Amino acid sequence: MATNNVSIVQRLRDTDVEKVELGIDVEKAQEQVGLISKKIAEAKVTDPQTNAAMIDLVAENKRLQDNVEKGRKMYTDPLNRIVKRINNLFHPLTQTLEADEKLGKRKINDYRRMAEEAAQKERERLEREYQAKLKREEKRAEKKGEEPRTVAPPPVVETPVPTKTYGSSASATMKEYWKFTVENPALIPEEYKIPDEKKIRAAVNRGVREIPGIRIYPEQDVAISA
């Protein structure tokens, strides 16, 4: 692990960071952005000439956007490659640990469930014995013409595993979480149904123009070709 860490840090120092310095001149880009922003904000479109001027400004803006994005990637791509390598190094460890955590928790839950099932069976057995004793006592008393004697109730079988249990250096607390499973979508109240916008968009793109409960309408936008 230590060797891998040193290798990654060394590559970060020796290569990738040096490449970042070859990127866009950020200060110059800031000046250009400020200038084009000011021009677009102050310009008015009132006739064919000013409309043509705005088209050129928007096209210039788009070219600047492309240059800024290229510059950003020149800064971030080397760093993203490092992040990817680091993630590839650590993700398998994290995935293994997370899987083992789930396995350990499942075994703790299984133990608790089995212990509770055994305790419940014992409760039911004791209850059956108690009811059988009651019936025998009732028959005995009826045969002798006397009041039935009191039959001691069955002992209480406590929950075998408490809510909180302890290891030598940690503790485990059982918590209750409410979950749900959709069994019959047709019975779900309307307030819990969400329209599938992806399917709606696909239908509109295919040419569908009428869907009950949905207003489909055209909008215009400007596409600038430089």
Image (tube, rainbow, N blue to C red):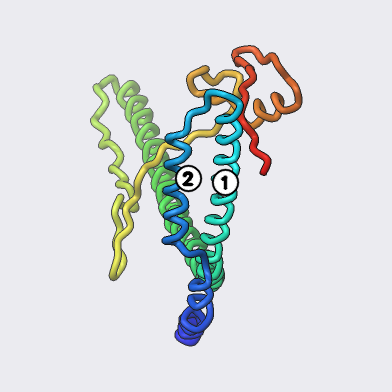
The disc placed on residue 144 is none
Picture residue at 50% right of the left edge, 60% below the top: 103
Q: Mark 2 points at which residue?
A: 36
Q: Residue furthest front?
A: 49
Can you tell which quarter of the image residue 47 is in?
top right
Q: Which of 159 and 157 is in front in this view?
A: 159
Q: Which of 134 and 81 is in front in this view?
A: 81
Can you tell which quarter of the image residue 27 is in?
bottom left
Answer above or below: position of 6 versus 118: below
Answer above or below: position of 129 versus 170: above
Picture residue at 47% right of the left edge, 64% below the top: 25
> Could you tell me how far apart the alpha carbons at marks 2 and 1 are, in whole angstroms?
8 Å
Q: SS of the residue at dot 2?
A: helix
Q: Mark 1 points at which residue?
A: 60
Residue 1 seen in this snapshot = no
Instruction: Give the residue type at disc 2.
Output: Ile
Residue 225 at x, y percent in the picture: 68, 40
Residue 109 at x, y percent in the picture: 44, 53
Residue 207 seen in this snapshot = yes
Q: Residues within 10 Å of mark 2 (few under 14, many from 20)?
A: some
Q: Residues within 10 Å of mark 1 (few under 14, many from 20)?
A: some
Q: Which of 94 and 66 is in front in this view?
A: 66
Tell me the quadrant of the picture where the C terminus can be found: top right
Q: Earlier in the sequence, mark 2 or mark 1?
A: 2
